[in-house]
Amino acid sequence: MDVEIVRFPTTNLAVIEHHGSPLLEHQTVNKLIKWRQENNLFDNEKYRCYGIHYTNPAITHLEQHHVDFAISIDKPIAKNPYGIVSKTIPAPPLCQST
């Protein structure tokens, strides 16, 4: 196995949160897709997609399952009917030897 260490920059996100059954995640993702289309965020290189899982659906009760579906963005998010909100993936701190 090859390991590559990369620096991941602070990334601003447009996020929709999914709580509940993994079988219904597609309904949540469809809302994010519709919002993305309405905001003309079509460039997949610029507006990258992320799934941020807080729980493991294989061992978590359905009602406690939580995942964020996200798109990297470069502009503020206006109030919207889909429940899309702003979140950030922070850049990890750099380690230094002393």
Image (cartoon, helix red, strand yellow):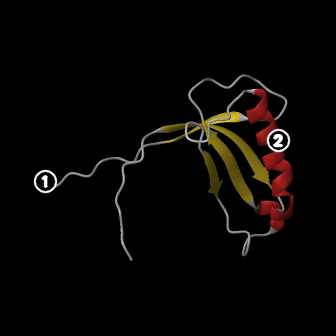
Give the class, few, some or many, for how many residues have Cα within 10 Å of label 1's Cα (few <14, many ≥20): few
Q: Camera-side residue: 80 or 5?
A: 5
1 or 2: tag closer to the N-terminus: 2
In the image, what residue occupies the spot 62% across and 36% down?
Answer: 43
The relative height of residue 24 versus residue 48 in the rendered view (above or below) is below
- Residue type beneath disc 2: Lys
Percent x, y for residue 59?
72, 75
Q: Which mark is drawn over residue 31?
A: 2
The one nearer the camera, 1 or 78, is 1
Q: Circle 2 — which element?
A: helix
* Label 2 packing within 10 angstroms: few (<14), some (14-19), many (20+): some
Q: Secondary structure at mark 1?
A: loop
Q: At 82% from the left edge and 48% from the top edge, which residue is drawn?
A: 28
In the image, is residue 51 above or below residue 38?
A: below
- 11 lies left or right of 41: left
Amino acid type shown at disc 1: Thr
In the image, residue 77 lies at what x, y percent? 67, 26
7 up-or-down from 53: above or below: above
For this rendering, which residue is in front, 44 or 29? 44
What is the C-alpha distance between the residues marked 1 and 2? 48 Å
Q: How many marks?
A: 2
Residue drawn where x is 61% and y is 41% of the image: 44
Q: Quadrant of residue 14?
A: top right
Identify the residue position indicated by label 1 in the image. Answer: 98
Rendered position, 39 above or below 23: above
Q: Judge depth for marks 1 and 2 and give the one in front.
A: 2
- x%, y% of residue 47? 60, 38
